[in-house]
Amino acid sequence: MDNMVQACPKCNLAKSDKDLYEWYGKEGQYDIPRLPLGKYLKLVYEGFEKKGMLDSEQMSNEGNLDVFYLGSVFSTL
């Protein structure tokens, strides 16, 4: 999947192949604008739905589900 959310060229270069939460980081995770966040979460939902993982108990390596795990669905599509 190419860019999941459109960005200006400068931001796109800085974003590279990181998902939205990786790009904003732990400190900025609450500062993500509503529109890109909504689009990202919709894509995450569709990705988990497509893989049949909406009810999955699979968690991150640490055994908990957090926002930084959500983008992992794109690496396994």
Image: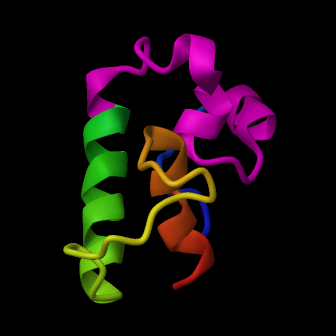
For residue 13, above or below residue 30: below
For residue 75: magenta?
A: no
- Camera-side residue: 6 or 75? 75
Q: Quadrant of the N terminus?
A: bottom right
Q: Main secondary structure of the magenta part?
A: helix
Which residue is painted at 20% across and 74% down in the image? 55
Residue 54, position as x, y percentages in the image? 22, 73
> How far across and how far down the image is residue 45, in percent?
26, 64
Residue 1 seen in the current view: no
Look at the image and give the residue range highlighted in magenta.
9-35
Describe the colour scheme in one phrase: rainbow
From the top left corner, tell me how far across and down residue 64 is, in percent.
45, 48
Q: Does the magenta stretch include residue 30?
A: yes
The answer to which image quadrant residue 61 occupies is bottom right
Vertical comparison of 35 with 55: above or below: above
Which residue, as the protein is rendered here, is positioned at the far left?
55
> Camera-side residue: 60 or 36?
60
Q: Which residue is drawn at 35% across and 87% down?
A: 51
Left/right of residue 22 with respect to residue 63 in the rendered view: right
Q: Which residue is depicted at the point 50% across and 45% down? A: 6
Q: Where is residue 34 in the image (x, y as percent from the top left)?
A: 27, 25
Q: Residue at x 44, y 42 (%)?
A: 66
